[in-house]
Image (cartoon, rainbow, N blue to C red):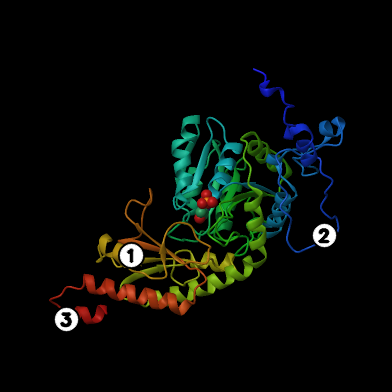
Amino acid sequence: MSDTSEGSTPTPQRNDTLATELIHHPYKPPADFESPAVPVFKGSTVYFPTVAALRERTWADKSGYTYGLHGTPTSFTLESRLASLEGAKHVILAPSGLSALTIVDMALLQQGDAMLLPDNVYNPSKDFARNELARWGISQRLYDPMQPASLAAQLDREVKLVWLEAAGSVTLEFPDLRALVRTVREKAPQAVIALDNTWGAGIAFNAFDLGEGLGVDVTIHALTKYPSGGGDVLMGSIACRDDALNDKLTWTHSRLGIGVGMNDVELVLRALPNLPLRYAAQDASARRIAEWAQAQPQVARVLHPALPGSPGHAHWASHCKAAAGLLTLEINAQYTPAQVDAFVDGLRYFHIGWSWGGPVSLAVPYQAKGMRKLATPYQGTLVRLCIGLEATDDLIADLAQGLARLAETAAPAADPALTATAG
Ligand SMILES: *Cc1c(COP(=O)(O)O)cnc(C)c1O
């Protein structure tokens, strides 16, 4: 119904010219504004000067921009810096470390194929295989990463993807990466070798060049951890050197419609220059805490690959220059899970929560029993510690007060001699 009330002239509509003026405004950012920060370029739509340019431009080789989902100058910059970090040629960004893992699986496997995972792999990776890949007729097999013969026994023509992880999740065993890679190359040359490089972060070792002419084909990296460094970003990356492999990964990634937000990319770009400093500081602090913890009577064993006696220490020493700030305390089996939970609850500086690589130290207890499908050489409760950037002495004092309380709660009250040694 038209508005004819009082016969007045209709109010001019705001959209007459304002909308067009607001959009086609003359402002352009200065071309000579140079600063250390990479600008945040956002966009779903990217303009093309002509229809011919729209038809011709390609993005998969990063020679141009076509659509926000395929990247902007901001994400292309992060990808190229991560390629340098990992010693790779190509990098693809994903919205989490887990999605980086699952994209690799989806790009490289089809019905009838088998995928091999180390028994100490990041657990959601097993879960994805068991619940999603299984529905598509792709099988999962587990191997003991500390026994190359266990890997060899699982390799046959069906195996198209072998995952490695160093160090393993929670229990931090460091495998003989060169022996594992050599075994796959000899017995299953058709298989792609992928490594979850979150722990090494591109700093501890070079996954693409492990020495003796050996290297992996693909790495994934949970940028959520060290590269972000703030406990405030979720992102992952997939890196490789081979062009054909990169094409496969790129097209699967693109067809799945997976992109990342440029504000998140900016946060990772901002944190990347101080990654080596943070990694070194957390490494040094974790090693001091590991050595201290090893001498505490409530701790049966400390799992930390740089610590002599920890599983795979010799392999760590032959592959690595550094270690991440992670360690796991195997608490004496005499303490009940509830007592260990209370120990973790009572820590002051260690917060309870997932992830790592941020400024705040974190602790999570795990029951060793049932954690692995293959043999579990651990007893009692494991407490995984992620060392943040606090003063190491404060963290040691915090753990000391926690362990003292643990000893009190568990000490048989009737035996003063035992209480004294446990203190
Ligand atoms: C955290 C983590 C992931 C997953 O990263 P998200 O960004 O949390 O999805 C994968 N692998 C390892 C070893 C991790 O520690």
Q: In screen coordinates, is 6 left or right of 392?
A: right
* Quarter of the image that includes the C terminus: bottom left
**Image x and y of residue 413, in percent:** 15, 75
Q: Which one is in front in this view, the residue at disc 2 or the one at disc 1?
A: 2
Q: Is residue 75 above or below residue 325?
A: above
**Image x and y of residue 277, in percent:** 62, 71
Earlier-in-chain disc, 2 versus 1: 2
**Image x and y of residue 420, in percent:** 22, 82
Task: State the residue lying farthest toward the left.
Answer: 414
Q: Please, what is the three-letter code of the amino acid marked with disc 2?
A: Phe
Would you call the spot at circle 1 few (<14 residues within 10 Å), some (14-19), or many (20 or more)? Answer: some
Look at the numbered disc 2 and say if its residue's Cβ is closer than 8 Å to ligand 1: no
**Mark carried by residue 345:** 1
Q: In screen coordinates, is 20 left or right of 411?
A: right
Helix, strand or loop at label 2? It is loop
Q: Please, what is the three-letter code of the amino acid marked with disc 3?
A: Pro
Q: Is residue 141 above or below residue 280?
A: above
- Report which residue position mark 2 lands on: 33
Q: Please, what is the three-letter code of the amino acid marked with disc 1?
A: Asp
**Mark carried by residue 77:** none
- Report which residue position mark 3 lands on: 416
**Residue under the point 51% across and 47% down:** 152
Earlier-in-chain disc, 3 versus 1: 1
